[in-house]
Image (cartoon, rainbow, N blue to C red):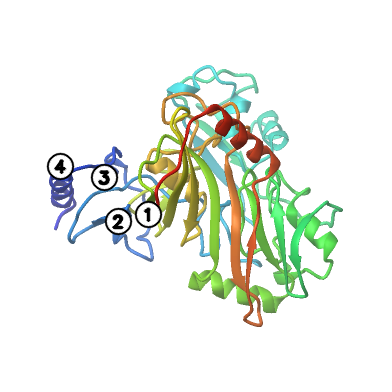
Amino acid sequence: MSDNQTTSNLRRRIANRKRRLDIPNPFSVPPIEASPPEDPVDHVAVSGREVSVGGEVEAVLFDLDDAGEDVDLFEDEGEDAQVSGSPAAGARTIELRPERADIGMRLDKYVAREVSDLSRSYLQQLIDEGQIKVDGQTRRSAFKLTPGEVIVVGVPAPVIDEVLPEAMDLDIVYEDDDVIVLNKPAGLVVHPAPGHASGTLVNGLIHHAPSMTVGGSLRPGIVHRLDKDTSGLIVAAKNDRARNSLVAQWEARTVEKRYIALVGGLLEEDQVTIDAPIGRDPMQRQRMAVIPAGRNAVTHLRSTERFRNANLTLVEAEIETGRTHQIRVHAAFIKHPIIGDEVYGRLRADGKRNDSRVRRQFLHAAVLAFDLPDGTRMRFESELPVDLAKALGRIRLENERTAPTHR
């Protein structure tokens, strides 16, 4: 069956549904010039309403791309995760295109928002060195942007000879001879990268445990990551035995990962499953999106509180896969972006800017469960950090709360 016939059939069947989610046509996304994914797109499902390309179709829920830099199995909610021991990324070029909402925004602020994995000071250095151009021209930091302009950010290959230990106040939840589980605060980068050669979680880890040289890379012991502005639980391996065990569990998808998030809009369904492939956004290569050529990504959302006056919903998110920015991309995909997300949720569902009570993306890794190398199952829980707990408390006081009924 041709793509046009498939699209036509999908649209007809959607029209016959009693209720459909208001999601943009997934087939309007321009194709990406890339080799086919290892796992072909089988379906997209939301709340049990499933789309099966080339098979029986009940509803369509397709869209942008990935949950992030999902370059391999161990990405998680953070930046493009790689297995510990893989080489650091080389030079890269990022192309950005300001939208209508960005008119008049300063160049430095716009780029800092869009390229969140690089520090502001490093981006300023790139601007000063002429590595960031607008329509091919070098511009100053204060240059005001206009929609339609093309910004090209040239990021040189990192020059990091070694990772130096740094004293750091680590919030250690559990530690033995094999693994260490920590509560990562928002604002902390997991491992060294361009613009973040020091001050990362890895720098603190090797100061705390000098023998942690697993893989001999810039990411010793790291098998999964969290975004810089995502807080919560993360585990690192202290030796090769533990690393091999954790990698096998991530690959087998036996690791339990649950997050707490505050999203825009009222998510009326008590439980929603988003099964939509994620990959590079063809229009904004620094971002991820749900795209046909993306990699398999599955996110389960459960509504725990609805704030009708504020038009917000508190949800618990569980991910089966670990694509870069997965929860953030999937939440935005179903038109319920995470509050405080400056990349995927700059506008709330009601068209207003992000809630002023939330100072950063409201996403916290609250539960992490895995097996120790000896087979013992361990499960850890982390309460909301103070900043998110206070913001949620204010919202609860100011708005009518409606608790969903779970069956």
The residue positioned 84% from the left and 66% from the top of the image is 210
Residue 99, compared with residue 341, is above or below; it is above
Lower sequence index among marks 2 and 4 = 4
Task: State the CA–CA distance, disc 3 to disc 4.
Answer: 16 Å
Amino acid under disc 2: Gly
The quadrant in which the N terminus is found is bottom left
Which residue in the structure is indicated by mark 3? 27
For residue 221, side relative to residue 73 (left or right): right
Q: CB of mark 1 within 8 Å of CB of mark 2?
A: yes
Amino acid under disc 3: Phe
Which residue in the structure is indicated by mark 4? 15
Task: Please tell me how crowded label 4 is: few (under 14), some (14-19), or many (20+) other residues with Cα within 10 Å.
Answer: few
Q: CB of mark 3 within 8 Å of CB of mark 4?
A: no
The percent position of residue 170, horizontal first and vertical second, equals 79, 54
The percent position of residue 404, horizontal first and vertical second, equals 41, 45
For residue 306, the mark is none
Which residue in the structure is indicated by mark 2? 48
